[in-house]
Amino acid sequence: MPRPHNRRTVIAPQRSASERWEAIAYGLAVSCLWAVALVLDPAGRESFRLPKSIAAASLALASLVALALAGRIVVSRRLVDSPALRAALPLAFAATLASLASPHRAHVLRAAPGLAVALLTLVGWGNGFTSARLRRLLDATLLPASLLATIGILQFHGIFRPFGFSGPMLARFETTSLAGNVGDLGAALVLPALVAQAALATTTSHRERWRRGVQLALLAYAIGASQTIAALLALCAGSFAIWAMRLPRRRLLLGLGGLVVAAILAVGLVAPLRSRVVEKAQALAAGDVNRVLTGRLDGWRAALRMLGRHPALGVGQGAFAAAFVPVKLELLDAGVTFFAEQQQVVFANAHNELLEVGAETGIAGLLALVWALGQVFGAVKEKRQGPDRALAVAGVAAIAVLSLAYFPFRVAIVGYPILVFLAWLLHQASSDAGDEQPTRSARLAVAAALTVALVLQLGVARDRFLANRLLRAAEARTMQAFSIATSPRGKAVLEGNLVLLDEARRRDPAEVGVLVARGSQFLLLGRAESAAAAYREALALEPRPETYLNLARALKMAGHESEAGRELAVALRLSPHLAAEVGSGN
């Protein structure tokens, strides 16, 4: 006979439908954090930022739909009083007013969905997830960030190079990992490095300390390898905040000394970083502030000029790039000297969030931003003393540093982890009580509204994704047909490209590259007047020095020599580097 045993069969309690939907929402939010790290599209012209933004926004909205079905997003007094909504609503209102008043319609329409999804995500995650879930979401940023850091380190040492780069470029700019941009990589690793330190400061598990220590070492080394000064300063500011609040006063000086020693070791051991720091020190000693800032003064001056010209509502949300060149020409006329070594002479962002908000949304946007910052600082004060308070202060300090020299809220790989942090910070403790039980119809109403937003987002995402691919395909076909452009086969390829570009233009009217590429097809086909018309349309949408140069070529081909000379002069004023290309006879 079998021997009886006393084991008890443990039956896990079944989760309710609400709990299942909340678990799905959390899984989608984690997927969003992985998407901003890993998603890329090699077949697109913009292979990194655009696909990451599309994937993250879609997954974030999908998580909000699941939270609504779970009954966690309730239209109630608690939601209206939540710090996340109080912070988001004035920003949304100011951006809407600025966009309605802006002459740059295509740009503001392109920027609107991204801002709307970000603000909805902040409010939805901040009110839908519990504080514990949001804290786990913050921890979930560590694994994708560690993967990014590992790839970046291998890339930096030449062990693994997943991407090839066309044309000569500094070795630093080839350390991109899966971020696509060295600055994006450095900035994206800062917040996870602080999360790792916060865990390291509180855990009592020996194994956990080793795990978090290895993650922190990877993240810090990768930030140093990126040689991104803004990210390094942000990491130092956040790290100091954590240890200043966690260590006793007597040990604080030792911790600060350790931080200084670590910084010195990083500069000493990473030769490219050492060269970059020495270069900055020499520029500072010479009083060349713009060199110290790597030309950022150019973007800051332009932002201030835009704010001065449009003080109430700015140039429109997302329209900084469209307004930059006219402002730069004004500044050049006023005798302002721009950074001579700047290769990218057109700024798509001001490299300062405060100034860019002022430039794009005017005083209305700045007042809304000040109000939102008040909500953030108030939430920091509400955090009780302990590890949460230290991480809150550290995160705000790091984001502030990044915002002064970069644009962390404009790039998905940096912005979405920050949204998780802000949702956790602005979360109300009372919202975990679960005392409100919405009716089924109320849940479905909120879920339906968010589903409509998701469908609209997917439509916009599909159009931008396909337009990005069509533009890349047309440019690749143009390069292949360049040497045979005058042959019947070459002309057939170029005419086919025009069909692709017309479709891309229909799907993404704000993509100036499509109009420039159309002009190039006409130029190669010998249709000078059509090329000039396409280039003029591109200049009306978003002026760039290369477009002025191409317009000059088209006008010269059409026999308008004097007009071509004027356009060429504008191109060379904006970008003196183009003189070499003109001299080569291209």
Image (cartoon, helix red, strand yellow):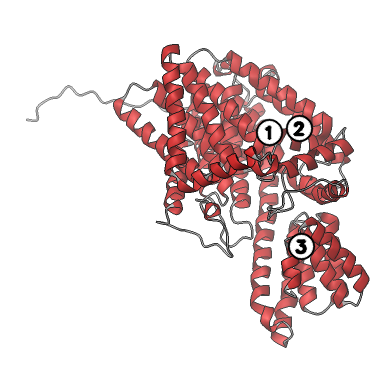
Q: Position of residue 467 (x, y in %)?
A: 69, 60
Of all residues, the one furthest to the front in this rendering is: 286
Q: Residue furthest left?
A: 1
Q: Secondary structure at mark 1?
A: helix
Using the numbered discs, state the Cα–Cα distance from disc 1 to disc 3 in whole angstroms.
Answer: 35 Å
Crowding near the residue tagged with mark 1, few <14, some 14–19, many ≥20 C-alpha atoms within 10 Å:
many
The residue identified by callout 2 is: 92
Task: Name the mark nearer the viewer: 1 or 3.
Answer: 3
Q: Type of residue at label 2?
A: Ala
**Image quarter (top left, top right, bottom left or bottom right) of the C terminus:** bottom right
**Residue 416 visible here:** yes
Q: How many marks?
A: 3
Q: Earlier in the sequence, mark 2 or mark 1?
A: 2
Question: Which quadrant holds residue 77?
Answer: top right
Q: CB under 8 Å between callouts 2 and 1?
A: yes
Rendered view: 152 above or below 422: below
> Residue drawn at (61%, 50%), measured in percent from left and top?
49
Q: Amino acid at mark 1?
A: Leu
Residue 171: x and y in percent read 52, 55
Q: Are marks 1 and 3 in contact (CB under 8 Å)?
A: no
Residue 68 visible in image: no
Q: Disc 1 or 3, which lies upstream in sequence? A: 1
Residue occupying image coordinates x 79% and y 31%: 365
Question: Which residue is found at the position 12% from the left and 25% from the top?
Answer: 4
Give how far apart the Cα atoms at labels 2 and 3 are. Answer: 35 Å
Label 2 and label 1: CA atoms lie apart by 8 Å
Find residue 119 and name its label.
Answer: 1
Give the residue type at disc 3: Glu
Query: Residue 497, image x and y in percent?
Result: 72, 72
Q: Between 402 and 204, which is closer to the camera in this rendering?
A: 402
Disc number placed over residue 546 in the picture, else none:
3
Q: Nearer the viewer, residue 208 or 70?
A: 208
